[in-house]
Image (tube, grey):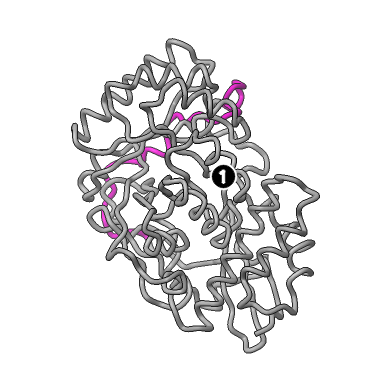
């Protein structure tokens, strides 16, 4: 079945106000969250946006000869759209939509002169996910069955949130909290961080998995200090402490604190970036984001590289994205899907706005539907030109 159209689109999904009464505002509105650019004072507050770095989804619809269409999305749409329209669309029109490996290889070879350009790989993600959604619809199978079928009945989750009391009430037993400090915050930052992690451990109890996500805000020296300071709190892992291209830094960190598991990968793009981490044995959990790493095709390659090395995979947002849910349900070495919990405490999860067809967490687990493709329930009239 040949591809006849590739369109960048907006989804205008109707939403209803929740029936439940919020108890307070979500943590996301007020939490201090450090990023690499937080080195500079004007970007210490997350309310000061970095141009072009918004995570607003960009949606792609791919249509074939019989009118069937699939949907995929990626982040950072303001920098990804031109790649989709100027490179991938003219490259793929008229080709067999079922041949996802071939199409994936075409896209990779087309962008090699850009090197490791993240925006090109992010844009590729939306195309690849739309192709898998389309394939599932044409074959009338959920994507997880195209991957070999389910290896578990449901996906165990951890909640990414600072509203730990609410997450506990919802039935989660694993948690990841945000990081408020940058590498340059020194001893005061270490003290602030230990206070936060210590309180979190007190709230969730001694047996719960607890993780911390610095989002690349540390350098090697500060990451070592953090790991040493937080050792008594027994973190399941320290996530993405360093910028992605600092391979030697990752190696040095792992040698310095071998007892602290290091997870990373959401901002690594493509299999080759992960291969370097895996070969260097400086990562304990790989975390590709299906909307940023190159799509499902690329995530499968990353998963296989990690599996061969005995390293588990925990895809970024795998629990709250339909795309990640299908990968997590099918792949045995995927552990703990991430569930982004930033809605107001007190509002039932099934009332929180989401892409229709995306399964919602129940008692700390989630199971995608068996609808064809990724199971997204998008009506044609909700799809608008961008």
Q: Is residue 216 magenta?
A: no
- Image: magenta residue range: 17-43
Q: Closer to the camera, 47 or 98?
A: 98
Percent position of residue 371, x then y? 40, 77
Q: Closer to the camera, 37 or 280?
A: 280
Q: Is 339 above or below relative to 129?
A: above
Q: Disc count in the image?
A: 1
Q: Main secondary structure of the magenta part?
A: loop
The residue to which callout 1 is attached is: 274
Q: What residue is drawn where x is 39% and y is 64%?
A: 330
- The answer to which image quadrant residue 48 occupies is top right
Q: What residue is drawn where x is 41% and y is 70%?
A: 357
Q: Quadrant of the C terminus?
A: bottom right
Q: Closer to the camera, 214 or 52?
A: 214
Q: Is residue 242 left or right of residue 80?
A: left
Query: Going by the picture, which residue comes out furthest to the bottom?
Result: 66
Tag 1, which secondary structure?
A: helix
Q: Closer to the camera, 69 or 298?
A: 298
Q: What residue is drawn where x is 47% and y is 27%?
A: 254
Percent position of residue 333, x then y? 38, 54
Q: Residues within 10 Å of mark 1 (few under 14, many from 20)?
A: many
Percent position of residue 366, x then y? 31, 60
Percent position of residue 279, x then y? 55, 40
Q: Is residue 82 left or right of residue 45?
A: right
Q: Is 212 above or below relative to 78?
A: above
Q: Is 96 above or below relative to 83?
A: below
């Amino acid at each position: 079945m040949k591809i006849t159209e590739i369109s960048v689109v907006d989804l205008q999904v109707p939403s209803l106000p929740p029936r439940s009464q919020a108890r307070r505002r979500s943590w996301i509105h007020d939490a201090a969250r450090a990023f690499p650019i937080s080195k500079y004072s004007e970007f210490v507050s997350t309310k000061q946006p970095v141009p072009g770095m918004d995570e607003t989804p960009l949606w792609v619809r791919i249509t074939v000869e019989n009118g069937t269409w699939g949907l995929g999305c990626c982040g950072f749409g303001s920098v990804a759209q031109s790649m989709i329209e100027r490179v991938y669309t003219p490259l793929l029109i008229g080709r067999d939509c079922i041949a996802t490996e071939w199409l994936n290889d075409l896209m990779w070879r087309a962008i090699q002169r850009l090197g490791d350009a993240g925006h090109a790989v992010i844009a590729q993600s939306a195309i690849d996910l739309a192709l898998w959604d389309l394939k599932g619809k044409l074959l009338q199978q959920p994507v997880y069955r195209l991957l070999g079928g389910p290896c578990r009945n449901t996906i165990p989750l951890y909640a990414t949130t600072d509203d730990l009391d609410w997450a506990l009430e919802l039935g989660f037993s694993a948690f990841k909290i945000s990081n408020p400090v940058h590498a340059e915050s020194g001893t005061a930052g270490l003290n602030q961080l230990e206070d936060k992690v210590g309180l979190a451990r007190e709230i969730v109890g001694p047996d719960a998995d607890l993780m911390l996500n610095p989002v690349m805000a540390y350098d090697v020296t500060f990451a070592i200090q953090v790991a040493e300071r937080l050792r008594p709190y027994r973190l399941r892992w320290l996530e993405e402490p360093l910028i992605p291209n600092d391979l030697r830094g990752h190696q040095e960190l792992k040698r310095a604190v071998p007892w602290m598991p290091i997870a990373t990968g959401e901002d690594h793009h493509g299999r080759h970036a992960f291969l370097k981490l895996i070969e260097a044995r400086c990562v304990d959990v790989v975390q590709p984001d299906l909307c940023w790493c190159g799509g499902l095709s690329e995530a499968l390659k990353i998963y296989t590289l990690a599996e061969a090395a005995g390293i588990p995979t925990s895809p970024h947002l795998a629990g709250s994205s339909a795309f990640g849910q299908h990968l997590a349900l099918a792949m045995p070495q995927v552990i703990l899907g991430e569930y982004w919990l930033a809605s107001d405490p007190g509002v039932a999860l099934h009332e929180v706005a989401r892409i229709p067809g995306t399964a919602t967490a129940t008692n700390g687990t989630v199971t995608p539907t068996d609808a064809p493709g990724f199971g997204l329930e998008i009506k044609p009239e909700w799809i608008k030109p961008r």
